[in-house]
Every structure is written in C-alpha cells, then in structure tokens.
Image (tube, grey):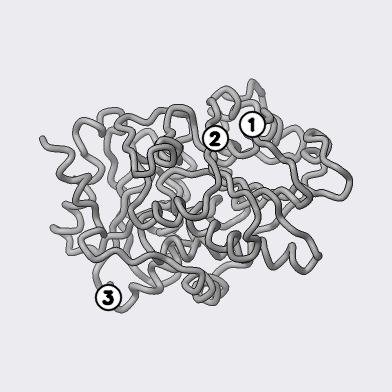
Amino acid sequence: MDASRYRSQGVLLNSPLQLATIEDVVAAESVIRRHISPAPLIRSYPLEKELGLSSDRRVWVKDYGWTPVGSFKLLGAINWLANHFKEIGDRPVAAHSSGNFASGLAFAGHQYGKRVIIVMPSDAPKVKFERTYSFGADVRTYDKSTDHITGARDRLTHEIAVTENAVAASPYDDRHVIAGNGVGGLEIARELNQQGRSVSHFLCAVSGGGLMAGHALAIRHHYPKSSIIAVEPVGANDFGLSLAKGERVRVDHPDSICDGLLSYDVGQHNWPILRECVTSAITVSDEETCCAMKWMDDQHGLRTEPSGAITIASLLEKKVNLDGDGDVVIVLSGRNVDAVDFQRWTGTTS
C-alpha cells in the first residue's frame, strides 16, 4: 500500500492555498462567542517565584482545559463548521484526530446540528473517546503504531469522504481552523491590555501548527516585539527541524507521550505564518513533561495532559531566556488525560 499517496494529497489541500490573517481571527471571534465564553487566563504566582522574575513581571497561563471539551480544539472546529455550514448541508463531516479535535468537532456538530464522523487512533485516551461520543459523533479507529507504514489514518478519512459523501475537515491545516484558534490570542491580548500589561514572551506547543499559527497572528499583532516560542517533544520536533532548514520537514515516526503533538509535519496553511511569526523552537523530553504535569497538579491543582504541560516544562527546565521587561504568557492546550496514565507518568496515587 502506498501510504504517501494519501498523506501527500491531504484532505483539504486540493484547493488553492488561502492563508489566515488577523482579520480572519477578528471575524471568527463573533462566531466563537455565540457558543462559548473566553477560557480563563490564570496568573501563576508559583511560576513567578520558580522563575525568579522581578516583582513587576507576571506569568499567565491560558487554560483551555476549562472548555466543554477539555482543550482548545473546539475554537477552530466551531469556526470551520460555521464557515462551511451551507456547503455541508445534509452531508456528514469527517476528520481525523488524535482525540481533542475529535471532541471539538463533535461539539461543533452538536451545536450546528451536523453529523460528525471521526477517525481516531485505537489507543487514544479513554477520556477523549468519551468526550467525542458525548456530543454524538461516530468514531472509526486505526492502528497508530503502524500508520507511518500503512497510511491508514488518511486512507480511512479519505474513504469516508468519498463513500459517505462527507465534507472533510483538517484538524489544523485550514484557514478557518487557524482563525478560530486565534480567537484565544485575542482574548489574551484584550485581558492584558485592559490591565495595562505587556508581553515579552509567549510560549505555545506546536504540532500541525493550528494552535500556534492562530495565536501567533494575534500575539504578533498586539505585541510585535514579543518573543513567540514554539515548544515540541524531542521525539516529534518536525517544526524545529523545519525552522532550521527554512522549509517544511517531515518526521516519519513521531514518538512521545504527548499524543496531541504527533503530526508528521506542519500544515501547509500554517507554515508561512509560523515561519514569519515564531521566534524560536525548543524541545522538551517526556520525562521533563511528566515532571511539569506533577508540578501543575501540586501547585495549581490542575491535572493536565502531556501536550498541555509541555510548555510549563520548558519554563521549569529553564530552557527559555526570559530577559525582558514584559509578562510571560503560556498556553495550556488541554487537560484530557486518563487518570491511570496521569498517575503512572507523575508517580501519584490519587
């Protein structure tokens, strides 16, 4: 089986490339507000102390684990579905997802009365399956461990689109998904600007790039001098490799406990935005991420998934030069982790 045939053709990339803009992000906010309120921006006094920042600087955590689906993914999903509502009509919507976009799109489908079919890895966290099912989605599974050989994920998604006449959605490689995600960046800027704060450093996880691209558009617009830093697992560092080479680099077998950060490469719609806006990329080991998960539980009472805690880990491990005179903002992308896995990774018993 020629797996590359399905990967290269993609799902939405047969049409001309249309890049998201800050205007798209602004337009998406009115769509998002019809369905959910802004995710909280939490000041982290423990992180300020841990990092030894001067008393006039603050650390903020944008906590998307608070949302109805436990992650940021519903932002892009809602905006995508709203912008494709007429095109979809009575047809179903299909997408592949490691789990968070699955529940995000299921939530959007529930809100707009559309049937959603999701392709998920069979070993995805149970909580992600449960959230996706709870909003009425139909789930099909594949073996993630062999997908780099078989191309089963993209093949199955493509087959659903063809045989069931479904409209296919990308979890990250789409202008409307990026713009919807970027609404979170507008929320950050609005709240901090109201307090008269500035931002010197913005840290966000990167995989396919939908979260970072949307936020980078908003943060760069409001804080043009800020350092925008991408964080990714050591075993799935396709963006860092891409940034170093100046072109998109593919990692054929990404490996990490950060199940939400295992895309093979950065999306085509995302790459130009990331290349323009992101200052640098750093990597974090799974062991460091586990320590950050425990630290967040101990210090903030938040049980985060690995993909959410990886940005916290980058700061706790002092991987970022925080010189400057503004505030530090960190994106906590989600909290969807099974209790048994959390206990195993953090060494906790309850």
Look at 62% across and 67% down and name the residue there: 37
Tag 3–tag 1 contact (CB < 8 Å): no
Tag 1–tag 2 contact (CB < 8 Å): yes
Mark 2, secondary structure of its residue:
strand
Which residue occupies the foreground of this view, 133 or 309? 309
Look at 74% across and 41% down and name the residue there: 323
Is the residue 82 above or below the residue 59 in the image?
A: below
**Eye-nearest disc, 2 or 3:** 2
Spot occupied by residue 125 in the image (x, y as percentages of width and height): 45, 37
Which residue occupies the foreground of this view, 121 or 126? 121
Q: Which mark is residue 87?
A: 3
Q: Which mark is residue 319?
A: 1
Q: Earlier in the sequence, mark 1 or mark 2?
A: 2
Report the Cα–Cα distance between label 3 and label 1: 45 Å
Q: Number of callouts in the render?
A: 3
Q: Is residue 40 left or right of residue 239?
A: right
Quadrant into which the C terminus falls: top right
Quadrant into which the N terminus falls: top left
Mark 1, secondary structure of its residue:
loop
Q: Mark 2 — residue?
A: 282
Q: Earlier in the sequence, mark 3 or mark 1?
A: 3
Q: Amino acid at mark 2?
A: Ile
Dividing the picture into quarters, in which one does residue 176 lie? bottom left
